[in-house]
Image (spheres, helix red, strand yellow):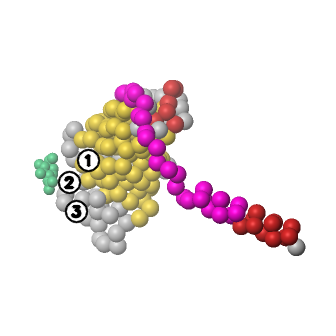
Amino acid sequence: MVRGILLAWIVVLSIAAASVHCEYYSTSTPYEPVRQKKTHLRFFLHDTLSGEKPTAVIVARANSTPKRNDPTPFGTTFAIDDPLTEGPELTSKVIGNAQGLYLSSSQDKNLTLVMYVDLGFTTGKFKGSSLSVFSRNPVTEANRELAVVGGRGKFRMARGFIKVKTSYLNTTNGDAVLEYKVTVVHP
Ligand SMILES: *[C@@H]1O[C@H](CO)[C@@H](O)[C@H](O)[C@H]1NC(C)=O
Ligand SMILES: *[C@@H]1O[C@H](CO)[C@@H](O)[C@H](O)[C@H]1NC(C)=O
């Protein structure tokens, strides 16, 4: 009997002790940022909407009549797996891929996309690492910029921007080659 009560007390006490430690958050401690490095990257992104094996496919679109000859009417959402290459030709060395979504987001005549894209690298020093892009992309502007909001692997907690230039664009079918010049700050 006495042993039973003792045992019950031990159970009660250990549950009480455990409940102190089972909040879903830790205590906050001072964060000392490490000295950051800056890295520049330059590559080309191939966004192919046409042909047998497109790298950008429509996954959603508005239930309205699109204008003729407009491959990207407002509201159209594409899923992409676009190769990234060293040079502007698709035959040049592949260094990674851009996977994610972009949305045609502008109601006026200037095409704007909002990009929700992960740029992953498959070769070299940054193999296995990737950059998170979440940004408006005003496609009709010659010198435009995307925001890099984070990253994985060597780019964990990265911040930066990408200067984008259109290297090739077919306005009929939407196929494009884009030059990406990345500036990124990371630990
Ligand atoms: C569309 O783009 C042109 C050229 O960049 C610019 O002059 C014009 O103001 C833009 N229109 C709108 C509605 O943003
Ligand atoms: C642009 O796309 C259209 C439609 O697919 C095609 O007929 C035309 O040849 C393309 N233009 C170039 C320069 O590749």
Please name the residue shown 26% across and 47% down the image.
Answer: 139
Which quadrant would the C terminus be assigned to in this image? top left
**Magenta part of the chain:** 13-41
Amino acid type of disc 1? Val
Label 3 – label 2 distance at C-alpha = 8 Å
Disc number placed over residue 130 in the picture, else none = none
What residue did someone put label 1 on? 139
* Nearest to the observer: residue 36 or residue 54: 36
Disc number placed over residue 110 in the picture, else none = 2
Please name the residue shown 88% across and 73% down the image.
Answer: 1
Q: Residue 115: image x %, image y %?
A: 36, 51
Q: Residue 28: image x %, image y %?
A: 46, 48
Q: Secondary structure at mark 1?
A: loop
Tell me whether circle 2 and circle 1 mark residues in contact (CB < 8 Å).
Answer: yes
Label 2 – label 1 distance at C-alpha = 8 Å
Label 3 – label 1 distance at C-alpha = 13 Å
Q: Is residue 29 visible?
A: yes
* Nearest to the observer: residue 148 or residue 122: 148
With 123 as the anchor, is 107 left or right in this view? Answer: left
* Nearest to the observer: residue 103 or residue 91: 103
With 109 as the anchor, is 160 left or right in this view? Answer: right
The quadrant holding residue 46 is top left
**Does the beta carbon at disc 2 come under 8 Å from ligand 1?**
yes
Is 56 above or below relative to 13? above
Disc number placed over residue 107 in the picture, else none = 3
Tell me whether circle 3 and circle 1 mark residues in contact (CB < 8 Å).
Answer: no
Amino acid type of disc 2? Asn
Q: Secondary structure at mark 2?
A: loop
